[in-house]
Image (cartoon, rainbow, N blue to C red):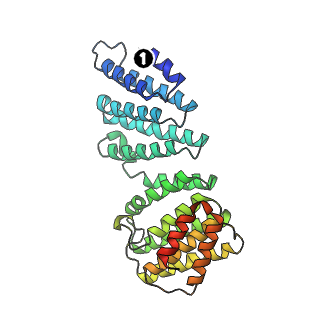
Amino acid sequence: MLDLITRLLNENPEYYTIWNHRRRVLTSLLATEALPQSPEDLLQGDLYLTFTLLRKFPKCYWIWNHRNWLLQQSEERLGTDAACKLWSGELQLISRMLHADSRNFHAWGYRRFAVSQLGRLAHASSEAGHIAVSLAESEFEYTTKMIKSNLSNFSAWHNRSQLIPQVLRDRQANPQARRAFLNSELSLICEAINTDPFDQSIWFYHRYLLSVISSSSPQHQLVVEDLTNDERKQYYEHEMAYIQEILEDEADCKWIYEALIMLAEACFEVEAESGLFTTKDMRAWLDELKRLDPLRRGRWDDLEKRLNV
């Protein structure tokens, strides 16, 4: 039965009903006392199957889903230490997958899950002693490496944002260290914007950094936990001045106008007047957005009404 299912999956791994049937067969075999091979060999065989399928179909949800199920079965049937070894091996597999396609968001999502599983197992496994310290730091360095090789990597930027709160906790960063960290990240993203202001992924990360400066951001997500409104204003004005410089050379980049509007809103949030822009400037930025992005004109009209400009 497994052989027949394997043939079907090699033809079409998107057939999720067949994956469900395979798990039923495997569950039945694992419960059989007279199994001709050990549970470990049976599970390893299926792990190898998913590996070969991922090489041909790297963005098939059901292959990744089945691999996750196999790892969970390994923990239940083989113990925590064995599961820890297998999850550690998953990071190597994912690295190979991302080397082939650095923007495979399936692999990035699975990588986050693998890291979370290793963190959970680290507290219960003697084999995980060397990874008991959070993997957040090494994963953060990995995102830096991937971003430097390809700035336009949405998943790497997103993964970086997800890691930051844990990295700061692991470092036991004091207020001064948190400010230095924020300044470093803003410097990194400004350098990226200067390199390619038309890259959407960069602006998404820039928006994230501005969101965790805001007083409306949840406390556990704040990079700096004790920012004053005056400090927020300084950050907003610094970013606006830098982006306005970029605008002088890239007048047809819609992401610049979106960022300027967002920064203007942020200044209103801290009730701060700024000499860097006027209501007339905001109206001009919105007019440019309507010109450059007519498909979203309704959004810009709505924003214009909300800002009362």
Number of numbered discs visible in the structure rendering: 1
Q: Locate residue 33, reporting x and y percent.
A: 27, 15
166 and 271: which one is in front?
271
Residue sitting at the far right: 249
Q: Residue at x 48, y 53 (%)?
A: 159
Place residue 188 in its image quadrant. Answer: bottom right
Q: Locate residue 284, reporting x and y percent.
A: 62, 77
Q: Which residue is mark 1?
A: 2
Above or below for 212 versus 121: below
**Residue 181 shows in this picture:** no
178 and 202: which one is in front?
202
Which amino acid lies under the numbered mark 1 shown in the image of this protein? Leu
Above or below for 88 versus 185: above
Task: Kindly state the secondary structure of the residue where label 1 is placed.
Answer: helix
Query: Mark 1 Cα within 10 Å, few/some/many (few <14, many 20+)?
Result: few
Above or below for 256 versus 8: below
Quadrant that contains the N terminus: top left
245 and 176: which one is in front?
245
Q: Locate residue 162, reporting x and y percent.
A: 44, 56
**Residue 143 shows in this picture:** yes
Q: Locate residue 61, reporting x and y percent.
A: 47, 36
Q: Residue at x 69, y 67 (%)?
A: 252
Q: Residue at x 33, y 43 (%)?
A: 121
Horizontally, residue 238 falls left or right of residue 221, namely: right
Q: Residue at x 41, y 26 (%)?
A: 17
Above or below for 253 versus 236: above
